[in-house]
Amino acid sequence: MKKILYSLLIITVALCFMGCGKSETAKQAMKVADAETITDKLDEIDGWLISDIWNKGFVDIRDYIANGTSSTGETLDIDFTIESLDIAIKKKPDYDSFIDGLEEEQYAQIKSIWERLSPEIDLLYNQAKEIIPVVNDASNSFDTGKLVQYRDAFSDAIYDLD
């Protein structure tokens, strides 16, 4: 019985040593996999920002206030647009947490841009909820200029990772 246990111990130790030689390669592979996962998540956030928040939300609200139509010049149900924005905005806390958790230096610019972009999303969303958009309302200053500036910089920073 002692011989069997001793043999198992030797085999276990030998396997550990064999595996240790590959640990640097395994660590590198893990870093690459993590980077790909992070990039995938950032691409998801960028898609959400462009499609759900901008294209289906803020740009239509802005144009509705200015001229009573969607950004493409079509009729628009503003209540439905805001309801859709309500659904989309629910993802934002998770995205805030994800970006806040990025610690690698290569993501510093993305985090810096998000620190400006995230509050701007909140500001415009809250404004759309508090002041019901009305057609040709010159008193409603639904200014999307900063959001566009930050959104474009965010997209560019993600693209530059590739």
Image: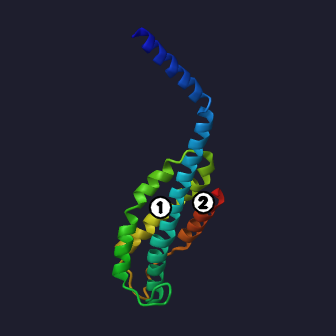
First in sequence: mark 1 vs mark 2: 1
The amino acid marked with disc number 2 is: Ile
* For residue 72, side relative to residue 128 (left or right): right
Residue 138 is at least partly visible in this image: no
Q: How many marks?
A: 2
Q: Secondary structure at mark 2?
A: helix
* For residue 77, side relative to residue 145 (left or right): left
Q: Which residue is mark 1?
A: 119
Image point (48%, 15%), residue name? 7
Image point (45%, 71%), residue name? 52
Q: In which image quadrant can residue 24 be found?
A: top right
Crowding around mark 2 (Cα neighbors within 10 Å: few <14, some 14 to 19, many 20+) is some
CA distance separating discs 1 and 2: 19 Å
Considering depth in this image, is 160 or 40 the residue closer to the camera?
A: 40
The amino acid marked with disc number 1 is: Pro
Q: Which residue is mark 2?
A: 158
Image point (59%, 68%), residue name? 152
Quadrant of the snapshot with the C terminus: bottom right
Considering only vertical position in the picture, is 84 above or below 114?
A: below
Residue 20 is at least partly visible in this image: yes
Residue 142's x, y, as percent? Answer: 47, 76
